[in-house]
Image: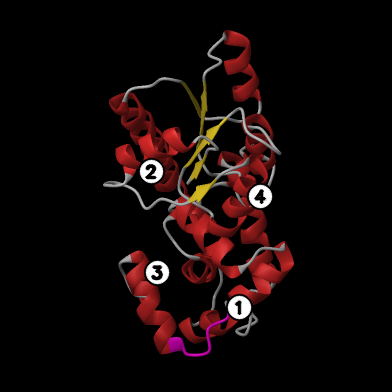
Amino acid sequence: MIIEDNPDVVQYLTSCLKESFELSFAYNGADGINLAYEKIPDLIISDVMMPEKDGFEVCAALKEDERTSHIPIVLLTARAGVEDRIAGLRRGADAYLAKPFHEEELLVTLGNLLAIRQKLQAKYAAFPDMPPQETKEETEGAFLQKIHALVLEHLSDSNFSVEDLCRMIAMSQPQLHRKLTALTGKNATLFIRSVRLARGKALLQEENMTVGEVAYAVGFTDPKYFSRVFSNEFGLPPSKI
């Protein structure tokens, strides 16, 4: 997503990125914030000097909101002094490019940010089995811990849905789907199922319960379906745990 009020810069960014990215645009800071909440993009490129809200305000607003805190943000500015760069970084900017910048510099910067995001996704992919101390100090780890706890609170309720979860955390379904997919590689439906399965695995290891009893305890209504998705998740049937 590009937030930029200068038509020439918008045109240049479009020419650099249109072959590799699906682009959306906002032309002032306030509209950029609202569009980011709506789209939950994978990356944001924002100018600093803009009407209504500047890039620093955009960055601060998005990094402080759970819906968008995970999105990498690149700030663009003609003011390349140390104080300006520090101001952007303090507000959570992930990178800073001084105008004019070369296309290759832009693409390398975005590629590096996406690579960092992929490493984070790989880390959180096994989230339900991760020790809490590995994530509790991180903003996104804390978010996942909160979602995890809410699912556990309703674990035996087979009717507990993504819609219920979204209502509890005040996010829309598309917002939650995109954030969880960005962080873990799993959409909200699969994330809830993974939490159920991880708890089911723990019960099989720790308690003297049958596969059917465990299936019902973690919110499945069909033990056969539980066994099938359990095997897909962990590579062996629950009867072998």
Q: Position of residue 209 (x, y in %)?
A: 54, 79
How packed mark 1 is, by other alpha carbons closer than 10 Å (few <14, some 14-19, many 20 or more), is some
Name the residue type under label 1: Ser
- Residue 66 or residue 239, whichever sits in front: 66
SS category of the residue bearing label 1: loop
Q: Position of residue 40 (x, y in %)?
A: 53, 54
Q: Which badge, 3 or 1, is on the more N-terminal residue? A: 1
Q: Which residue is mark 4?
A: 66
Q: Which residue is mark 1?
A: 161
Q: Which residue is mark 2?
A: 118
Name the residue type under label 4: Glu
Q: Main secondary structure of the magenta part?
A: loop
In percent of the image, x 56 and y 71: which residue is there?
A: 207
SS category of the residue bearing label 4: loop
How packed mark 3 is, by other alpha carbons closer than 10 Å (few <14, some 14-19, many 20 or more), is few
Distance, label 3 to label 2, CA atoms, is 31 Å
Q: Which residue is mark 3?
A: 241
Name the residue type under label 3: Ile
Q: Position of residue 62 (x, y in %)?
A: 64, 43
**Range shown magenta:** 219-223
